[in-house]
Amino acid sequence: MTEITRREFLKLGAAGTAGMALVPLANPLGFDLAAAKKRALTSRIDGAKEVHSVCPYCAVGCGLIAYTKVSGTTTQLLQIEGDPDSPINEGRLCPKGATAMQLATSSRRVLKPLYRAPGGTAWEEKSWDFMLDKIAQNLKTSRDNTFVAQDANGNIVNRTEGVAFAGGAAFSSEEGYFAAKVMRSLGVVFIEQQARV
């Protein structure tokens, strides 16, 4: 094996780097990689319907563009990207917003309510009516079991200490107001907002 000195190694490295830098200039076809990528993307969404939407993750309201195609009776989601015309995000998306397409296309997405009974090991599909009734029953049971009418000093407090509520950052002002009113009417004192957590 031929030994190479440090100086020769640096010379070869510099020559290789210079050669790589000159390759685009010496390209007789003028092949532009960025343009080729753009053409490939354009062909993928060519003829797709462009739908403007808002990112569902937080209350900032970043604009999204979804590209969809209809084939038969189904609509296929092709791509989601930031809306460059949005004054809020100007086409950029945070890491959560950039994965918005997975909300609709992930193979792990849960499409029906699942319930696991206490002590159970398997999830069972249930109806929405069953789930809403179960949530209401559990909320009432927790409230009844942990309701405090008076504190240690005899002050009337009428609160429940066994229930907490965390609001979603994607709530509108009206949804947040309604949720806070409902929770306070139940006596819930542990109320938090996802945007602060």
Image (cartoon, helix red, strand yellow):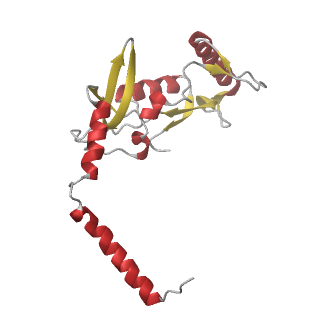
Instruction: Determine the residue located farthest toward the right in the rendered image.
Output: 119
Residue at 35% across / 79% down in the picture? 14
Q: How many marks?
A: 0
Up/down of 81 relative to 128, above or below: below
Q: Residue at x 38, y 84 (%)?
A: 11
Left or right of residue 165, residue 44 in this image? left
Q: Where residue 132 sits: x, y (%)? A: 58, 15
Q: Is residue 84 left or right of residue 175?
A: left
Q: Position of residue 124 (x, y in %)?
A: 68, 18
Q: Position of residue 146 (x, y in %)?
A: 68, 28
As drawn, 18 above or below 130: below
**Left or right for 106, reference 63:** right
In this view of the protein, which residue sits in the foreground, 150 or 163? 163
From what the image shows, is residue 69 above or below residue 103? above
* Quarter holding residue 117: top right
Q: Residue furthest front?
A: 1
**Towards the viewer: 52 or 127:** 52
State which quarter of the image contains the N terminus.
Answer: bottom right
Closer to the camera in the image, 83 or 36: 36
- Image coords of residue 66 (percent x, y): 32, 30
Q: Residue at x 58, y 10 (%)?
A: 129
Asked whether the viewer can see residue 89, the reply is no
Camera sees residue 20: yes
Quarter assignment of residue 189? top right
Q: Residue at x 49, y 22 (%)?
A: 182
